Amino acid sequence: MANKIAVASVIAAVGIVAVIGTIAAVTASKKGGDKDGGGMSAGVKLSTVCASTLYPEKCEQSLKPVVNDTSNPEDVLRAALNVALDEVAAAFERSEHIGKGAKDNITRNAMDVCKKLLDDATEDLRDMARLKPVEVLDHVKDLRVWLSGVMTYVYTCADGFEMPELKEAMDKVLQNSTELSSNALAIITRLGELLPEEAKKVNATAAAAAGHGRRLLGWRMREAEEKTSGRGVPAADGKLNEIADVTDASRQLLADTLDEISALSDDASRRQLGLMFAKLYSRGAKGDLLWRRRHLLTMSLSVMTDEGEEQRIHMNHHLDAIANMSTETNRQLLAEELPDDLDGRRQLLSRRLVGISEVAGEAKRQLEAMDQPADDHHRVLMTTNLVGTFDEIEDGRSGLKSSDLPKSAPANQRRRLMQLPGGRKQPSRNRLLTTDVIGTPDEIEDGARSRSGWKEQSGDDAPKWVPGDLRRLLLQIQKPNAVVAQDGSGGFKTITAAINAVPKTYQGRYVIYVKAGTYKEYVTIPKNMANIFMYGDGPTKTVVTGDKSNTGGFATIATRTFSAEGNGFICKNMGFVNTAGPDGHQAVALHVQGDMSVFFNCRFEGYQDTLYVHANRQFFRNCEVLGTIDFIFGNSAALFQNCLMTVRKPGISQSNMVTAQGRTDPNMPTGIVLQSCRIVPEQALFPDRLKVASYLGRPWKEYARTVIMESTIGDLIKPEGWSEWMGDIGLKTLYYAEYGNTGPGAGTSKRVNWPGYRGVIGQAEATQFTAGVFIDAMTWLKATGTPNVMGFTK
């Protein structure tokens, strides 16, 4: 080839070299450990490898210089790394002349962004190149995500140029990069098929000997898990011990809602609950009610000591029981046909959730008196799933007495019965409890703290019985590494100052607490800063705001108010706003490209392009996103669970599109998934919601993929459901699907009839878009402590 291949071509070499390296290792092993190593042989040739790609001729042409019959794995990988460094430098050089001398702000801005994105691709490439051949099989899913990220950076670089001639020139420079990256992605995707069984066995053995710490881009998940569990929610044993002890620390964590416990729930444990509780009922039928009450609600430390491991298993079952109550709450609330107007929805949810809030508080208070004799009015008997019914909780009619209960519970019993002291009526307060359903008012945090008597505590306040690692975690929650406050009461007055002060050699999760206030600054969590946990006082109390927009002279990606580029970023209880308005056109409130990032109880407000899920993997839980056109867009593997999508009133002659997904290759494991979410109009749009055209999404790129599942869709969504981008672009190659949705806008009889629209898919197909599969959440999300459901929610 006359010119050197651009950035992604190197990735193609690395991916294929890894495959061939593994095969060579197998061949050498079969020959009795030949010291010279083995070349390509025994069943897999370069032509066979390249046949699985979209550009097979280019695949063979690019790999022949670095792959031959005498290359051993080490030599090939070393050569690939050296070529990678050379080619990235060449890519920079070839792109520097494009747009040079331009006087308009957008072009100059696009040039800067392009250089940054190619630099990000370089850094990710270096990390991927560090993988040994025997580690490749253990990281197939990761490699697919990271390669997709590099490809996304490449096309984002070109997309930043608005002038057609400049964009065309950049596309031409990066064409080889795109095509050869696609080849590498195809090979990694089919890696399991290409390797013979002997190679898989050798890989598994070698990987086991080397350890299975997940090598991430710039950080190790194992190290992160050992040092901290992300947001700081303890493991099951620690959580139940806190409930039993009811110290200040446990009060805070318990009042932080039952939702946080639901992360520990899974289908297997739920199936065991009936048998477990039947056993407990049977054991306690002839004994005193106090015994049953104590064991069904929690277990004391003395019982744990006496019965050992068996009680630990039971303790985990109790946690699952509490989690089930949260899951059932979510299921019932989302299934209801709630009013589409925001005020009506809030009022109804408030009435429902406040009951749960009061019951949880009452349970906590009764725990403190558990060792004292209790009369019938103060007895608590918990089975498995629900505290009475919502109406009974609200009206104070949950009046079953202990004498009314059966001597032994049937295995299929799925209710939690609770007698409130004195049969008193639940007080009504306009306060939402943060559980499985998102609430946006600031009262969420105020309510949790006022109910729990929360306050910042010293390290000595952590319970002495908490194991060492959990104790350190509790202390980390209570004592952030940095505090940001505009009034000077913290160590920093701006978020940027706090980020700049993070020690470069810091190990573990670095916690930044941002006190209530409106922070008018543009914040970036840099790519080299992993494991940042940032939390505020509430999504409408701690707010980061900016007003950059495309009409103001910025490329779309550069309009962001807040950018999370570091891996493992976790954010809780914060709001991000772009105030440019509908006239600003593209105006991003949050941009995120860090892999394995999490946002919990956050709010993203803007109009067009509010939330940019750029690349890699992200999980959003209990968040609210407000916008108009393409207000959730990008090419990451992004899953939104229990979130509120609030569609705003657009400008004149504009339509609303909730999503605009940017997948450019059929092998990319990316897409946007909305699970157990609600799509509703904001109050200003409500009167005109049937006049303004609103859609679930449109295909930004050729292979766009979006799935709406188990969600409630308001009547603002037009019957056809989805909108075109430009003519027939992507209509044959996109992947749009729906599953298990409810609400007046969920009907699919009048949906679009594009070849790529899958309609309502079956459960087996929908499974691939659940958290455990789609974002590989089982390997990393639990460590963050974020509430989640790995499978289906209904």
Image (spheres, grey):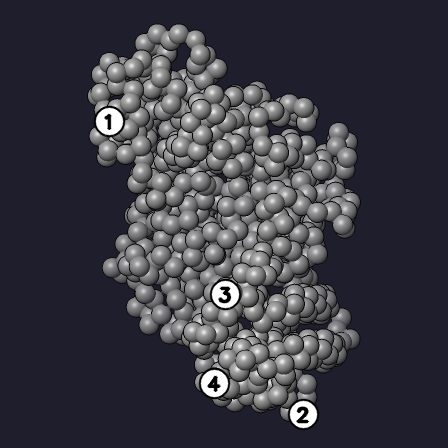
Instruction: Identify the mark nearer the N-term, 4 or 2.
Output: 2
Q: Secondary structure at mark 4?
A: loop
Question: Disc 1 residue type?
Answer: Ala
Q: Marks 2 and 3: in contact by CB < 8 Å?
A: no
Rounded to the nearest angstrom, the CA distance separating label 3 from label 1 is 46 Å
Front tag of 3 and 2: 3
- The quadrant in which residue 592 appears is bottom right
Rounded to the nearest angstrom, the CA distance separating label 4 from label 3 is 19 Å
Q: Secondary structure at mark 1?
A: loop
Residue behind mark 4: 42
* Residue at 47% in and 69% down: 201
The picture places residue 406, in percent across and down from the top left corner, at 21, 21
Q: Mark 2: few, some, or many residues within 10 Å (few <14, many ≥20)? A: few
Instruction: Identify the mark nearer the N-term, 1 or 4.
Output: 4
Question: Disc 3 residue type?
Answer: Ala
Residue behind mark 1: 409
Q: Depth check: 742 or 581 in front? A: 742
